[in-house]
Image (cartoon, helix red, strand yellow):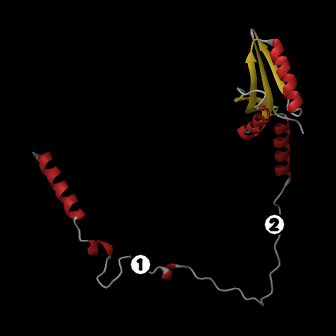
Amino acid sequence: MNRALSFLFILALVVSSACKPAAEARTSSPDRTSARVVDDISVYRPTYPADDANAPATARVEPTNHANARVAVLMDSVARVNKNIRYAQGYRILAYNGSERQTVMDLRKAIIARVPEQKDYLTYQQPNFRLKIGDYFSRIEAQQVLNQISDLIPNAHIVQEQINIPKQ
């Protein structure tokens, strides 16, 4: 009984608040004539003095001790570690996955003729040959090369794999 009474009370409260007159809901004071509530908040805005155009410019102060020997040593160690990184997660194009050796070799020659700057990776796991093309950091780069060779290999697709980082 107590639950039913509290439910009816909440329902009556919701209905009474929903039936509030529209004019009373729009404005908070009776002297407003428009339907929009507009508050003047310009008194809260900060004001700053205007710069004089003919005032002399102050000299620029250069920071001192912004790079010290310890920071240089740390940056050198980070650069050394980064030079030793040889692999990263990236993308390659899976051009062929099948068991026919002559087919994969012909396809490899055709791809090298089409895009000679891309490195190819031919692996054999009995009984299948896999031919993968390129080392790409982003899927967009891989898609651009895939568009160049899509007429040679219509069923080639992009796979996520560990790639070799090219040395500069």
Residue 134: x and y in percent read: 81, 31
Left or right: residue 16 versus residue 68 is: left
Placement of 65 over or under 85, stated as above or below = below
Placement of 52 over or under 37, stated as above or below = below
Disc 1 vs disc 2: which is toward the camera? 1
Q: Residue at x 84, y 26 (%)?
A: 120
Q: Among all residues in the image, which is located at the extreme front?
A: 151
Q: Among all residues in the image, which is located at the extreme bottom?
A: 54
Q: Residue at x 71, y 38 (%)?
A: 139
Which residue is tagged 2?
63
Residue 97: x and y in percent read: 73, 18
Q: Residues within 10 Å of mark 1 (few under 14, many from 20)?
A: few
Residue 38: x and y in percent read: 41, 78
Question: Where is the N terminus found, in terms of image quarters?
Answer: top left
- The amino acid at mark 1 is Val
The quarter holding residue 56 reads: bottom right
Q: Earlier in the sequence, mark 1 or mark 2?
A: 1
Placement of 92 over or under 42, stated as above or below = above
Between residue 112 and residue 159, name the one nearer to us: 112
Between residue 36 and residue 6, name the one nearer to us: 36
The quarter holding residue 88 reads: top right
Q: Residue at x 47, y 79 (%)?
A: 41
Count up the numbered dots: 2
Between residue 106 and residue 167, name the one nearer to us: 106
Element marked by disc 2: loop
CA gap, disc 1 and disc 2: 47 Å
The quarter holding residue 157 reads: top right
Placement of 50 over or under 91, stated as above or below = below
Which disc number belongs to residue 38? 1
Left or right: residue 157 versus residue 60 is: left
Between residue 155 and residue 85, name the one nearer to us: 155
